[in-house]
Amino acid sequence: MTPPPCDRHKNLEMVPFGQTLIDVCPVPSCGRCHDDQGYFEVVDGKLVRGQIADTNKFVVAAERMVNAFRARAGP
Ligand SMILES: [Zn+2]
């Protein structure tokens, strides 16, 4: 499956994150992510997307994921 483009950087394909179903925008300052439910991002430790009820577990996972990705991508 081809990763979707970032919805903010439509000329850039998102990068698959490890063994997850999540793709991440390659632009470090963007932080946009995409999974099978659509686009989301992590802002101030909270996963932000349209409407979501209980995402505590996923917020932690997504935050770790984004941090790990940024650490690997460098400044
Ligand atoms: Zn982006």
Image (cartoon, helix red, strand yellow):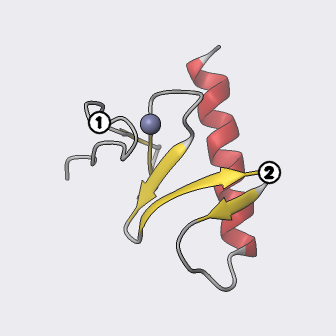
| Residue in view at x 45 percent, y 29 percent | 26
Measured from the top left, where is residue 1 in percent x and y? 19, 53
Mark 2 neighbour class, 10 Å CA radius: few under 14, some 14 to 19, many 20 or more: few
- Indicate the amino acid at tag 1: Glu
Q: Confirm if mark 2 falls within 8 A of ligand 1.
A: no
Task: Specify whether 49 is left or right of 60.
Answer: left
Measured from the top left, where is residue 13 in percent x and y? 29, 36
| Residue in view at x 72 percent, y 72 percent | 57
The earlier-in-sequence mark between 2 and 1 is: 1
Relative to 72, does residue 1 appear above or below in the rendering? below
Q: Quadrant of residue 47 in the image?
A: bottom right
Relative to 24, does residue 39 appear above or below in the rendering? below
Furthest residue toward top: 75
Nearest-to-viewer mark from 2 and 1: 2
Q: CA distance from mark 2 to mark 1?
A: 25 Å
Measured from the top left, where is residue 7 in percent x and y? 36, 47
- Indicate the amino acid at tag 2: Asp
Measured from the top left, where is residue 35 in percent x and y? 42, 61
| Residue in view at x 51 percent, y 45 percent | 32
Q: Quadrant of ligand 1?
A: top left
Task: Specify whether 54 is left or right of 72.
Answer: right
| Residue in view at x 67 percent, y 25 percent | 71
* Residue at disc 2, secondary structure: loop
Q: Which residue is mark 2?
A: 44
Q: Which residue is mark 1?
A: 13
Where the C terminus falls, by quadrant?
A: top right
Relative to 16, does residue 29 appear above or below in the rendering? above
